[in-house]
Image: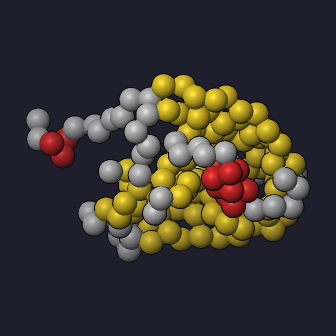
Amino acid sequence: MEDTDRITMSEFKAGRLLLGRLPYRNDLIAALEGFCAAHSIQTAIFSIIGSVTSATLGSYDQNQQVYVTFNKVEPLEIVHCTGNVSLRNGKPAVHAHAIFADINGHTLGGHIFSETIVYAGEIYVQELLGQPLSREYDKDTGLFLWR
């Protein structure tokens, strides 16, 4: 097996378990990154439930190596949202994906971007203790991936 065929892993111990409420009418990504910076959280996993007034989502176009984004401005329920926190340029960076549902139950999902505006949200954060993960540019994919 070549090195490029191996899964790279890091081992962590459980740190703080945090439950909180996301701030009304704040950007979801910015609020979470700010919270992590304020509480010295460098690596974590999280889950969010609640709703937003608008969502900016995207998918990665592998051929062009760019995210294609769209914005949906209407009340949306967060059906599922999960992600992680690691460092990028020495600061906490959130990587999150979600599925949202409109009032008729139609769903849409993808990678979450700013501006995704919180109406009401509850978050579970599991801090991970160990050597912090850091994102760096990967020339093969055009993405910022863990080292």
Left or right of 103 in this view: 19: left
Q: Which of the two residues, 85 or 54, is positioned nearer the viewer here? A: 85
Q: Which of the two residues, 35 or 82, is positioned nearer the viewer here? A: 35
Q: Residue at x 59, y 44 (%)?
A: 41
Q: Residue at x 26, y 63 (%)?
A: 140
Vertical placement of residue 117 versus 18, above or below: below
Left or right of 106 in this view: 74: right
Q: Quadrant of residue 14?
A: top right
Q: Looking at this rendering, what residue extends furthest in the top direction? A: 13
Q: Residue at x 44, y 29 (%)?
A: 12
Rendering coords of residue 78 (x, y %): 76, 46
Rendering coords of residue 45 (x, y %): 57, 38
Colour convention: secondary structure
Rendering coords of residue 44 (x, y %): 56, 39
Q: Residue at x 50, y 69 (%)?
A: 67
Vertical placement of residue 44 versus 101, above or below: above
Rendering coords of residue 34 (x, y %): 68, 56
Quarter occupied by the N terminus? top left
Residue 6 visible? The answer is: yes
Q: Which of the two residues, 5 or 14, is positioned nearer the viewer here? A: 14
Q: Which of the two residues, 5 or 34, is positioned nearer the viewer here? A: 34
